[in-house]
Amino acid sequence: MKREGQIKVDSENLFPIIKKWLYSDKDIFIREIVANSCDAVKKYQSLCLIGEAEDDGVKPRIDVVLDKNAKTITVSDNGIGMTEEEVEKYIAQIAFSGAQEFLEKYKDQTDADAGIIGHFGLGFYSAYMVSENVEIETLSYRKDAKPVHWESNGSHTYEISEGTRTERGTSIIMHISEDGKEFLMDFKLREILGKYCHFMPFEIFFSSVGEKKEENSKAEGNEEAKPEEKPVNNISPLWLKAPKDCTTEEYEDFYRETFTDMNLPLFWIHLNVDYPFRLKGILYFPKQTDKLQVMPGEIKLFANQVYIADNIKEVVPEFLMLLKGVIDCPDLPLNVSRSFLQNDGEVAKISKHITKKVADKLTSVFKNERKSYESYWDDISPFIKFGCIKDEKFYERVKDILLFKSINGEYKTFSELPKQNDKVYYVSNTDVQGQYIRLFKDNGLDAVILEHNIDAHFVTFLEYMESGTKFVRIDSEVGEALKSEDKKENDEELVGFFKEALNREQLEIKTENLKTENTPAILTINEYERRMSDISKIYGNMFGEVKHVSETLIVNSANSIVKKLKELDKDKRELICRHIFDLALMSQRKLTAEEMEGLVSRSVEVMELI
């Protein structure tokens, strides 16, 4: 017999709020309904374990069926099912959590809370974001239970009557509205199932009514001829296994499956924590394809194998979002809010623990496999440097394993760095600064290569953390080690030659006796002003434009060409001075079109002197 009832809500405005604003994305309804089905199956298994239900040996499964003609999506499970009383309780009273009562009732008899997601009330009503009408067909596992049919069009009323289901479990039939018609397409529904349900703990099968089946080429009646069903999900994700039981091939296959990235990861960290909170996951260090920019990563957050969201910075430290990985936190609710996460003490502990595990893993690889660690360094250094800048505690954990690649191709820790009067010289562009690198090598000096975009910030950070050490770009000054022991006073006559020829008021010019005699001159720039200029450009001049960066032309008075300048007439001397400056400028940066044109024309004039 059919009868009507009223949905009990705390406010008559609650229902439209649930329908429109409870979730930010409409497609979340699939996650909610399928997650409820997983709950129902898990509850039935738990009751069987303690003898409250009889195991009938039927394999757990969830079916998602799209019927384009009827415009319905049906999600069915063979779980615990519901009686008429339970339907009234869990569906008509929206705010009630069936899982909460289930756990409370059996908490002393079983570990049923492991894997119970638990919020049938509000989760069920997410169906109304895309449905104009929803039906429930359910049959409880209890003996002598009668099937129940429930139906509501999204108003405050519903109809309940005896149902037609003959096997335990529940079917949710969603009659899709015009607003939700996009979900009546096979590829769309498959895509959503892949996004939200790919690692749910019970097999999920998708089918579409009217879909053309593969023709059976074998004889009718042959059992082997039936097409094999394949679930759309992986019920045993790798993060559930103990790290010692996982092979390299499994880690790599799981990476490809999860991130559709054909580039193999460099290495990975397997998280497996049971106390003081439950946490499992795998973090991968991907190979960087861009040597200057940090490619964004992707950290997928799950709760009991149910996808929540990507890159939740309250759970995953911000710098680790440059990695790729999965983290499963069973203690998090599915509908996590930013305010909840920001104020939850356990979430903060999770974030700190993840940071510690990453630092521990990096330290272990460095100590036990330094050669491998060095081979990874160019790829992983942006992650680590960004992490140091964002989290000083992380820096303290990893500062002894930070590596610096020298111009000789060697990797050295901070304590091993070559220092000249507490200065560390570095190269920011090996192509442009080749002349300076050669000067250093010719004189047995060393410098480190720091040419990633993040290094502009990282050197400033290191100077702050390691007071007393100054990082100086290789073209910022001429170190004492490059100057000849035969020091001479500034040659004012030579300085005058260049000032007259170049006519650059803001350019400082001076002479030095350099050890390397075959270099006529080098151009240096003020380290501090250049850094400010670089940072200003990176942030679009938001801190104010640096209008001038001081430059100094160091003329090498030991060079044979420079020595001959005094013997030349004025025209030839000016031509050679401008050409020497062009060469020094070209070794410091890329020439503008106008500067290149001048260099080419003067090169012809120089050759005509022969």
Image (cartoon, grey):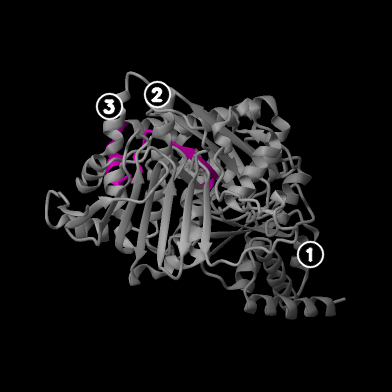
Task: Report if residue 246 lies within the magenta region.
Answer: no
* Residue identifier under label 2: 111
> In which quadrant is the C terminus drawn?
bottom right
User: Is 582 in front, or is 140?
Assistant: 140
> Outermost residue toward the right?
610
Amino acid type indicated by mark 2:
Asp
Mark in front: 2 vs 1 = 2
Is residue 357 shown left or right of residue 227?
A: left
Q: Is residue 46 visible?
A: yes
Where is residue 479? Give x, y as percent: 63, 44
User: Is 307 in front, or is 141?
Assistant: 141
Task: Report if residue 323 lies within the magenta region.
Answer: yes
Q: Secondary structure at mark 1?
A: helix
Answer few, some or many: residues within 10 Å of disc 2's Cα (few below 14, many 20 plus, some between 14 and 19).
some
* Residue identifier under label 3: 104
* Residue identifier under label 1: 564
Mark in front: 1 vs 3 = 3
